[in-house]
Amino acid sequence: MTLPHLPFELPDGALIRRFLDGDERAFRMLYERHTPRLKMTLQRLLGTRRQDVDDVVQDTWLAGCRGLHGYRGDAKFSTWLTSIGVRTTLNHLERRVDRDTEVLDEMSAPLTNGPASTIDLERALAALPDHQRLVVVLHDVEGFTHEEIGEQLGMATGTSKATLSRARQALRLALSEGVSNAS
């Protein structure tokens, strides 16, 4: 049963039910509503491999659609979808054989405009090791708890906390490089 018009204001749960009943427009609305933030998050998780974001977004939505029957609504749909995106990104990063070479190539790109250009959070995030970048983005950007991060990444809560501390320290160092009186 498809209605002639779907208001964009429909909650995610209603759109999900409509999509599961075969309404393609409901899926398009979910996609348009959630993809911009998902893409930004996955881009940060991918670090220097940002060119892969469209593939990872597509794989995330495919996995999400396959598992949508199992979505119980315990968490917000965006949180559920981001969790799938995190796992998809992890799988993508693990499949990359040449990732160390690629990271080194990206990091050795010349900086322009002196010290001002070194204050670039996105570049500093991208330069972090994968495990540190994942924890920083999930905790500080997406707001996941250390327990949730541990569950998603298969690590202990304490490991998540320690990784976040080391990552923040590396970010402080990267962002203060070339800046006088930086603490």
Image (tube, rainbow, N blue to C red):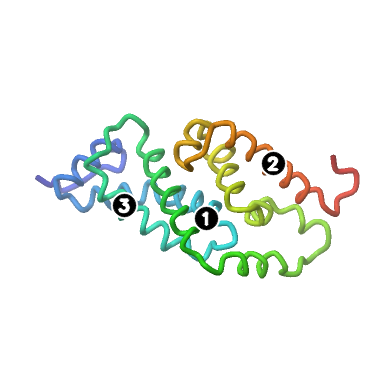
Q: Residue furthest left?
A: 1
Q: Residues within 10 Å of mark 1 (few under 14, many from 20)?
A: many
Kind of residue at badge 3: Ala
Residue at disc 1, secondary structure: helix
Q: Is residue 51 left or right of residue 172?
A: left
| 3D distance between C-alphas at marks 3 and 2 | 32 Å
Quadrant in the picture for the N terminus: top left
Kind of residue at badge 1: Gln
Label 3: which residue?
Answer: 63
Q: Please name whichever residue, 161 or 140, is drawn nearer the observer in this view of the structure.
A: 161
Mark number, residue 171: none
Q: Are marks 1 and 2 in contact (CB under 8 Å)?
A: no
Label 2: which residue?
Answer: 166
Label 1: which residue?
Answer: 43
Q: Are marks 3 and 2 in contact (CB under 8 Å)?
A: no
Residue depth check, mark 3 versus mark 2: number of the one nearer the observer: 2
Q: Please name whichever residue, 148 or 34, is drawn nearer the observer in this view of the structure.
A: 148
